[in-house]
Image: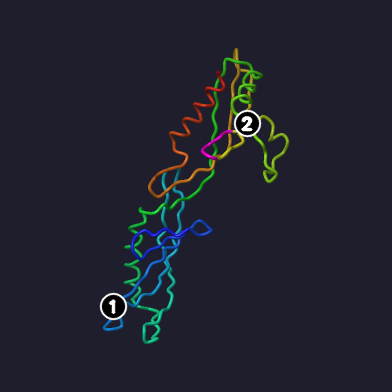
Amino acid sequence: MDVTLFHGLNVRKLSDGSYALEYFNGETSGNRGDITSDVTFVFKVTAVNDEEVLFTFPDTYTTQAVKDDFLVTYEWLDSFDKLEADARSVFSKLNTIDASVTLSSVFKGEVDSKYPSASVFANFKRKLGEYSWRSDERVTEVEKANTFSLTVGDKKYPLKVNVYPYRDGSKVEYSTKLTHTLFASGKSVPSAAEIDKLHAQIAQIVND
């Protein structure tokens, strides 16, 4: 869906995860009125780390030829230097859009429990429930064993749980792959605080 940021500029997210900036470039000349041409730049968004995203400045652009009231065609209204200045001006306003990149990361941890493995597994089953594997998730029966349904936002993930005897109780190891999204503003979904709550939730299940 196009999002209008300010007069004359639209931003579209493309299927490859890049963004297309489209705006009007033009001038007023004599009695011909405003002559505008559509200019499109495409820029990439990549992850630097778990908290930063990088905008790659575009080095190419496309223009759409237009005609004035006298059917005179105008395809290049400005010099490349002027178009580059336009792009940099537009680029400086990118913090007003919700540009993002989606990543997959491993969520894992381990917790000591005072209870035996049977009790720990029973708690996971009671609190989270077993994960319901979809037909398009290609996993082996071994991989499906001891997986529970971890809810993060509106998504459910297969949480793999292994329990080993440890001292007078058990040691619990858990892991899954979470999808998270980084935004240009620095916001992350789920946030670091939400990830911490997930670890705390599992620790509570282990020792409940």
Please tell me whether residue 103 is drawn above or below residue 88 in the rendered image.
Answer: above
Residue pictured at 54% horizontal, 35% vertical:
107
Residue 80 spot, x, y in % from top left: 35, 73
Q: What quarter of the picture does the C terminus occupy?
A: top right
Looking at the rendered structure, which numbered label has been put on residue 20?
A: none
Magenta stretch mostly in which secondary structure?
strand
The total number of labels drawn is 2
Residue 142 spot, x, y in % from top left: 71, 34
- Residue holding disc 1: 28
| Residue farthest front in this picture | 69
Element on which disc 2 rests:
strand
- Residue holding disc 2: 148
| Residue farthest right in this picture | 141
Label 2: few (<14), some (14–19) or many (≥20) C-alpha neighbours in 10 Å: many
Front in this rendered view, residue 135 or 84: 135
Q: Nearer the viewer, mark 2 or mark 1?
A: 1
Residue 69 spot, x, y in % from top left: 36, 84
Query: Which amino acid type is shown beneath numbered disc 1?
Result: Thr
Query: Which amino acid type is shown beneath numbered disc 2?
Result: Phe
Residues shaded magenta = 150-154
| Type of colouring | rainbow
Residue pictured at 60% horizontal, 12% vertical:
168
Element on which disc 1 rests:
strand
Q: CA distance from mark 2 to mark 1?
A: 65 Å
Residue 140 spot, x, y in % from top left: 72, 38
| Residue farthest left in this picture | 30
Taking the magenta stretch, the answer to whether it contains residue 88 is no
Q: Are marks 2 and 1 in contact (CB under 8 Å)?
A: no
- On the rendered structure, is 53 left or right of 141? left
- On the rendered structure, is 113 left or right of 20? right
Front in this rendered view, residue 22 or 1: 1
Quarter where residue 15 is shown: bottom right
